[in-house]
Structure formats: structure tokens, C-alpha cells
Amino acid sequence: MSKRQWAGFLAGVCLVWGALGVDALAAGSFEERLHALEPTIGHYPAEMKDKAGARAVKAQYEALKKDLDAALASRPKDEKLLYQRGYLQSMGHNFDYPGAWEGATADLTAALKIAPNDVPAILTLAQLWVNSRPDLAKNAEELFRAAQCNKGEAPLEEAQNGLFFALYYQGRLKEAYEQAQYLKHNWPNDPAYGSLVETVRSVLQKKGERLPEEPTRYAMGTCADKAH
């Protein structure tokens, strides 16, 4: 190999590694920027201290959305980028950003077509639907069950918690009561689950419904359920 060929080879290697490095840095940057937004808009209602804080968060959100748009313009089938933009927009929905719900649904659905077993994407879409559209509670239930299935038999708290709300919003109160009992049994240190049990018990008693005598002993929404 001549000196000219060797120099060309090294230049090519540097270009490849440079591109890989830029992609890796961008992916890391997107993840860090998403995490930075979670304390304020990662839940509903979003926590905006004042108008100035709200403007700052909106500016962060829009800048990250713009950068993800640009990244996806060159790699439209990149599942990780689709998930990240979908997750960002699910947070945007928490502060009623226009078009965020629709954008999140489209991106997360597209990501799951590419990688149907991506548990974070499954859970993000399920949470978006169950917390915003009671008419999509059945769809959310299926997603929560799929998330648990992909994690195996060990109970996945986020999936099991979401399943309670999916059942409750469908009016399947006895099943929701059993699920609340299951949550309380598996995570006894979280007082919220005891409150769920009492809330659903009160509703059922007012309806004159008989309560299940024993709490559920299995993880609702696992792969084992699909066999029945």
C-alpha cells in the first residue's frame, strides 16, 4: 500500500469513527435532555413554578423537538429516535402542548412497529392513553399486559399499576379491586396502593357488589394469562 493509499485509508477510518461518534454523542445528548425535563413535565400536572419557568421549559422542549426532528429526517426508521421523540411529546401532552398527544401516539406506534418488544415504548404509549383517553383504556390494558409479558413473570410495577387504571376506567371494578389488592400485596410500603383498595371497595359496596374474599395471588397481565 502506497503512502497515498494509506493516508486515504486513515482518512476514511476517521470519517467513519467521526460519524459514529457524532451519532453516539447525539443519542446521549437527547437522553440527558429528556431526563432534564422529567422533573417538570414528566408527570401530570406539569410543575411550572411561574410564567418565566413555563417559558423556559417550553423553550427546552421545542429545542429538543427540533433537534430530534432533524435527526429523524436523516434516519426516519431509527426506532430509538422515534421512541425518544414520542416520549418527549408524551411529556408535552402533560402541559397541553399543541399536537403533542397526536405526535406521541404516531411516533410510539411507529417505534413499536419496528421493535414490538420495546418495553419502555410500550409503557409510554400505554400511560399516554390510559391517562388521557378513557375510551382507549382497553388498548392501554393490552399494552400493559404486553409490557409485563416481555419482562417475564416477575411483576413489573409500572405495568401492574397501569393495569389497575386501565381496568378501572373500563368499569371492570371487581377486576380493578383484585388488581389493587395485588399491588398492595406486592408493594406493601406504598400507601397509595392501600388507598386504591379502599377507594374501589367503597364504590363496590355502594353498588351492593360482593367483594372477592381473597386477594389475587398471581401477577395479572403476564405471559401466563395468554395461555388461558
Image: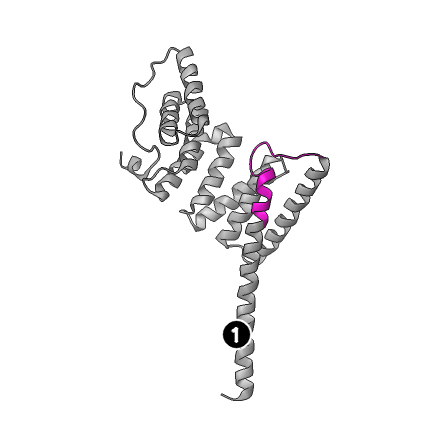
* Image color mode: one colour
Q: Which residue lies furthest to the right in this view?
A: 52
Q: Give the range drawn in magenta.
A: 33-50
Q: Quadrant of residue 150?
A: top left
Q: Was residue 39 drawn as part of the magenta stretch in this picture?
A: yes
- Judge by depth and name the residue closer to the eye, 46 or 12: 46
Q: In which quarter of the image is residue 19?
A: bottom right
Q: Is residue 178 left or right of residue 114?
A: left
Q: How crowded is mark 1: few (under 14 residues within 10 Å), some or many (20 or more)?
A: few
Q: Which residue lies furthest to the bottom in this view?
A: 2
Q: Quadrant of residue 151?
A: top left
Residue drawn at (50%, 34%) of the image: 129
Residue drawn at (52%, 79%) of the image: 9
Q: Where is residue 143 in the image (x, y as percent from the top left)?
A: 42, 38
Residue drawn at (57%, 57%) of the image: 26
12 above or below 23? Answer: below
Q: Where is residue 216 in the image (x, y as percent from the top left)?
A: 31, 27
Q: Residue furthest front?
A: 189
197 above or below 130? Answer: above
Q: Where is residue 197 in the image (x, y as percent from the top left)?
A: 41, 22
